[in-house]
Image (cartoon, helix red, strand yellow):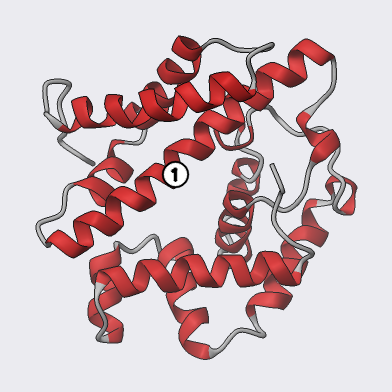
Amino acid sequence: MSDLTKDHPVWQEINEITSGIAWHLSKRYHRFVEFEDIRQAMNEYAWKRKDKVSEYLIREDAVEKKQGYKAFHTFIRRAGERYARKEKAKALGYELGDEYFYRLELIENLIKVAGTDESYLANQVFDPDVHGIRVKKLANEGNNLAAMIADVDRVMKKLDPRMQGILTSRFVNDQPLAEIAEAWDISPQRVEQLVAKGIKEIADKLGGATPY
C-alpha cells in the first residue's frame, strides 16, 4: 500500500494536471457536466488509487519520471472522460454499454481473470470505477463474459513468449514494473512500453479499442 498522505506535494501537481484536463473536457461536454465536477471526480479517482499514483509519479530517474507523468496523464484523462461520458449518458437517457467496444482497461481485467482460477475476479471485470456504470449489455458478445475471456486468452497465446510473460507478470501476478524489469533484464520504462504495446495489440486483434 502507498503511504502518500494528503499533504504530500504530489497532490498539488495532480490537481494542476486534472485542472487542465477538466477544462478541456468541460468544453467538450459543456451541456452535460461542469469543470469542477470533472476535476473533483479525477482527484477522487487518483486518491483511491494511491499505489498507481506512486508508481507513475514517484520516480527518481528523470527520464522515467517524464514517462511516468505521461502515463499518469493518460490514466487520469481516461477517468475524467469516463465520468463526463457517464453524465452525458444519464442526461440523454442511454447506457454507456450502447457504445461499448473493448476498452483497454477491460482487456487488462480479462487477462487477470483468464490467467487465474479465482472465479470471484470475474465480478471485477465490469468495475463501475473503470467503466462508469455496471454494463448491462455490450456490443461485443452481448455481455457474454466467458466468450470475452476466451477471446482474450486466444489472442494472448498468439503473442510472442516475452510479451505473454510480461503481461502475465503484470496483470495475473500483479508484479511491480521494477520486478518485471529485473526478470527480463530491461528497464521499468521499457516494461511500461511493452505492456501498453501488448494491450493495444490485443485490442486491435479483437476489433480495436473504444473510440471514445
- Closer-to-camera residue (93/23): 23
- The residue carrying pointer 1 sits among few (fewer than 14), some (14 to 19) or many (20 or more) residues within 10 Å by Cα, namely some
Residue 56's x, y, as percent?
28, 50
Location of residue 132 with respect to 39 vertically, above or below:
below
Location of residue 52 with respect to 30 vertically, above or below:
below
Amino acid type shown at disc 1: Phe
Location of residue 111 with respect to 198 vertically, above or below:
above
Quarter occupied by the N terminus: top left
Residue at 24% x, 55% y: name it. Answer: 66
Quarter occupied by the C terminus: top right
Residue at 51% x, 29% y: name it. Answer: 80
Residue 116's x, y, as percent?
56, 64
Residue 171's x, y, as percent?
47, 62
Residue at 82% x, 14% y: name it. Answer: 92
Residue 210's x, y, as percent?
71, 49
Residue 36 in sight in this render:
yes
User: Which quarter of the figure has residue 107?
Assistant: bottom right
19 displayed left or right of 97: left
Location of residue 130 with respect to 19 vertically, above or below:
below
Q: Circle 1 sits in a helix, a strand or a loop, which is it? A: helix
User: Which quarter of the figure has residue 8?
Assistant: top left
Disc tally is 1
- Closer-to-camera residue (150/101): 101
Question: Which residue is the site of mark 1?
Answer: 75
